[in-house]
Image: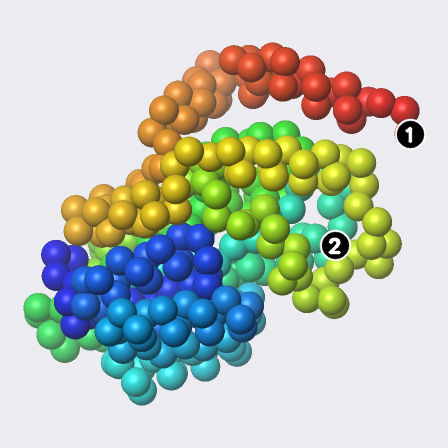
Amino acid sequence: MQEFRNQTAVLTGAGSGFGLECARIGARLGMRLVLVDVQQDALDRAAAEMQAAGAEVLARRVDVSSAAEMEALGAAVQQRFGAPHLVFNNAGVAAGGLIWETSPQDWAWVLGVNLMGVVHGVRVFTPMMLDAARADPSYRGHLVNTASMAGLLNPPNMGVYNVSKHAVVSLSETLYQDLSLVTDQVSASVLCPFFVPTGINQSERNRPAALRPQDARPTRSQLIGQAMSDKAVGSGKVTAADVAQKVFDAVAARQFYIYSHPKAIRSVQTRLEDILTPRNPTDPFIDKPEIGQQLRQALRAAD
């Protein structure tokens, strides 16, 4: 995609973080915006801001983990704007803790939003985009799926999140390859951010009551994971606005992998060397042993 003006963008998780910042860029570029979020007040604020900026907006409160709600969203987009040109499957939540302490409700919530939300976005919008491409040789479309550096690495004490994001990377790589088999007009990217202040560390606020563990008390490892996430995300120097610009630059350049922190790729290289050698997984705290020691001491401390 080289041209954004008068094109339609669908953005999930549009009430905050990367989704909101991409919406702001889209509004500046003259795009029609479909804003999707599960948090109504954040969605309302985003919609009002984009309308004030002159953008034509369709705002929908949607739980992206719901196949029916995403299908209804697709129908609404088709009716209002036709096939979208940019789909940003971005909505996500975070949870941590030792992997054997992850409850069935935790798995259902995190995989439902982080993975199935992307699955539904791909399943609903890709056929619409391919139909548009067949009907119009000038049509260009692009899907961007938000994964994480945790989709390329396996940091400890955040297993359910890692699993969800590895799946999104795999889904996105397969989507890219599948699209290349059938069209040159629609392509895909995967966004793999590191620690960026977006509010994802506070995503528990939007967890449905039905998906809260029956024992609502978090475990020690979950409390430690939350504290570490709060510190890491809150201290991030790269902003959500910086990452949003990288997303638009990547779409224009038809670039698949999008990184917020390119230096973090060194850890990915180490992981691949572990696999190829083969050797046991490298200590993720090898460059910052004091953090690893603090985590071990905290997890091993007596109750």
Q: Mark 1 = which residue?
A: 303
Q: Mark 2 = which residue?
A: 104
Q: Indicate the position of residue 254 as horizontal and vertical percent values.
A: 19, 48
Quadrant of the rendered image containing residue 300: top right
Image disc number at residue 33:
none
Please, which residue is most extreme toward the front here? 52
- Residue at point 32%, 70% (across, down): 50
Q: Indicate the position of residue 205 as horizontal and vertical percent values.
A: 65, 59
**What colour scheme does the image use?**
rainbow
Q: Is residue 248 left or right of residue 300?
A: left
Mark in the foreground, 2 or 1: 1
- Residue at point 61%, 51% (across, down): 202
Q: CA distance from mark 2 to mark 1?
A: 24 Å
Q: Describe the element under mark 1 as helix, strand or loop.
A: loop
Query: For the residue marked with disc 2, what is the amino acid?
Result: Pro
- Within 10 Å of the Cα at label 1, are there few (<14), some (14-19), or many (20+) other Cα atoms? few
- Residue at point 56%, 15% (across, down): 288
- Residue at point 34%, 37% (across, down): 259
Answer with mark 2 or mark 1, whichever residue precedes in sequence: 2
The mark tally for this picture is: 2
Q: Is residue 253 above or below residue 38?
A: above
The quarter of the image holding the C terminus is: top right
